[in-house]
Amino acid sequence: MKTTLLAVALVVGLASCATATSPTGRTQYVGAVSQAQLTQMGTQAFAELKAEKPLASDARQRAYLKCVVDAIVRELPATQRGVAWESAVFTDPEPNAFALPGGKMGVYTGIFTVARNQDQLAAVVAHEIGHVIANHHDERITRQMGAQTGLGLVGAVLGSQYGDGASQATSQFGGAALQAAFLLPGSRAQESEADVVGQQLMARAGFDPRAAVSLWQNMIAASSGRQPQWLSTHPDPQSRIGELQARATGLVPDYEQARTAGRKPACN
Ligand SMILES: [Zn+2]
């Protein structure tokens, strides 16, 4: 048992850091964990959330989200399209959403108060899936591990559960990974990149890319007085609205072409 954990620690800790080029041409430092490990972490984190948080009972809401996710996933690169994406609606008034490696998409019911039509919901979904296909989770983990010198993080991750049993250690691994890499705010560069990738995806899927702008306006209007979680992890909303607006104009031809080609999602 201990040998197995140690092996995991060594593999994770010693995996070499590599550079990659992101979808918008940034140099990324990635590779601290393998794609298989990322998938495992995403799957584990999603399972934990589903066990902890009440799921929405409204079947129409779930079908609505699934319809939007499916339409976006059809536009992903072939390697990502092959993943069987799973989505879940959690009962929580916060307007929040996330996507995880391994093909997991979650929204809180509060998101429907700001994403008021299928195009606005597609803006949320495509942004979150944009983080996944741009490999931002790998990038965050690699950065974390660099900061904490590899094995140190693994020690912290496995730490208290070390030797207590494989399932508990796995669970601890998933939980800590969720905190360290999945729920921390993305960097400004990652957020801008998810905006770019997401808006392209929604246009190609036949969702109006201009809805990304109105989504953010709703989000800001809804946040007067206090800051929703999704906003706090997505800083500087006003300047992003300007960027989304400028890009939406350029993406209208892609959107119209998608509609002409018959990609007309009807999820509402
Ligand atoms: Zn984001």
Image (cartoon, grey):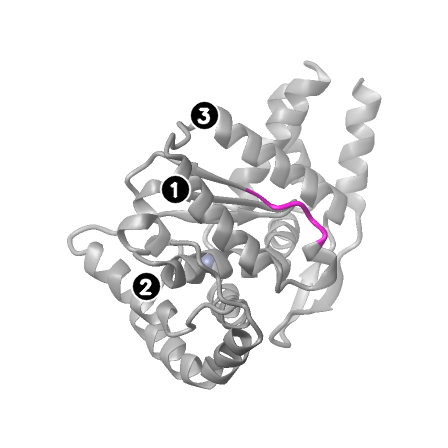
Image quadrant containing the N terminus: top right
Q: Amino acid at mark 1?
A: Gln
Say whether mark 1 is within 8 Å of ligand 1. Answer: no
Which numbered dot is residue 52?
Answer: 3
Question: Residue 249 at x, y = what percent?
Answer: 41, 84
- The answer to whether residue 146 is magenta is no
Q: Is residue 220 left or right of residue 200?
A: left
- Looking at the rendered structure, which numbered label has been put on residue 17? none
Give amino acid for label 3: Glu
Return the residue at label 1. 61
Q: Earlier in the sequence, mark 3 or mark 1?
A: 3
Q: Are marks 3 and 1 in contact (CB under 8 Å)?
A: no
> In the image, which is nearer the foreground, mark 2 or mark 1?
1
Badge 1 element: helix
Circle 2 residues within 10 Å: few <14, some 14–19, many ≥20: many
First in sequence: mark 2 vs mark 3 = 3
First to last magenta residue range = 82-86
> Residue at the location (53% across, 69% down)?
193
- Vertical side of 69 occupied by 104: above or below: above
Q: Are marks 2 and 3 in contact (CB under 8 Å)?
A: no
Q: Which residue is mark 2?
A: 215
Q: Measuring 54% from the left and 68% from the top, which residue is drawn there? A: 263
Disc 3 or disc 1, which is closer to the eye? 1
Q: Taking 195 as reference, is 79 above or below it?
A: above
In the rendered image, residue 188, in percent from the top left (x then y), is placed at 46, 66
Identify which residue, 244 or 85, lies in the foreground. 85
